[in-house]
Amino acid sequence: MSILVDTNVILDVLLERAPFADNSTRIMALIERKQCIGYLCATTLTTIHYLACKAIGNKAGRHVIQTLLQIYEVAPVDHKVLQAALNTGFKDYEYSVLYSAGVNAGVNAIITRNVKNFGSSELPVYTPEEYLVNVVGCK
């Protein structure tokens, strides 16, 4: 199974945001162990780079991105994805772009803590906890 992981899930891990970090870290571990294929939207990487460099400096921020690129595949954002995002019916263009990038990359599901923002999704959308319990079978 391939999953597109939303920015907020990655930030939960990087910033150790309680109480979300535990399940988000478990999602990342599944991907690192190749139990599923993880994708990040290209815009997630640019957002994380910006935030990381601001918080921990350029060198450490670049290291974060290098690490993520070793673990995850990238769902590209190009003209086709941006155009498709205009027609999804999502209220928020940012989430629409993420969704459209995932569809274009052929993912099977989206993992996010903002499930409500993907109301028009034709892909299954799970919180990290829902994915671990309902799909992976972990409690």
Image (cartoon, rainbow, N blue to C red):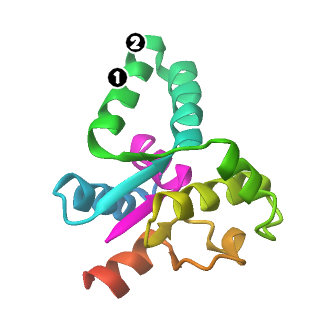
Residue named by callout 1: 63
User: Which class describes the residues within 10 Å of circle 2: few (<14), some (14-19), or many (20+)?
Assistant: few
Residue 7 or 129: which is nearer the viewer?
Answer: 7
Label ID, residue 106: none
Q: Quadrant of the N terminus?
A: bottom left
The answer to if 15 sits in the magenta stretch is: yes
Q: Please state the extent of the stretch shown in magenta in the rendering.
A: 1-16
At which x and y percent is residue 40? 46, 49
Judge left or right: residue 90 versus residue 107: right
Residue named by callout 2: 59
Residue 77 or 127: which is nearer the viewer?
Answer: 77
At which x and y percent is residue 127? 49, 72
State whether residue 138 is above or below residue 101. Answer: below
Q: Is residue 19 visible?
A: no
State whether residue 22 is above or below residue 15. Answer: below
Q: Is residue 77 visible?
A: yes
Judge left or right: residue 9 versus residue 135: right
Q: Are marks 2 and 1 in contact (CB under 8 Å)?
A: yes
Quadrant position of residue 91? bottom right
Residue type at the position of mark 1: His
**Residue drawn at x 34%, y 22% as measured from the top left:** 63
User: Which class describes the residues within 10 Å of circle 1: few (<14), some (14-19), or many (20+)?
Assistant: some
Q: Quadrant of the C terminus?
A: bottom left
**Residue drawn at x 59%, y 35% as measured from the top left:** 47
At which x and y percent is residue 55? 53, 23
**Residue drawn at x 53%, y 55% as measured from the top left:** 6
Residue type at the position of mark 2: Lys
Q: Residue furthest front?
A: 80
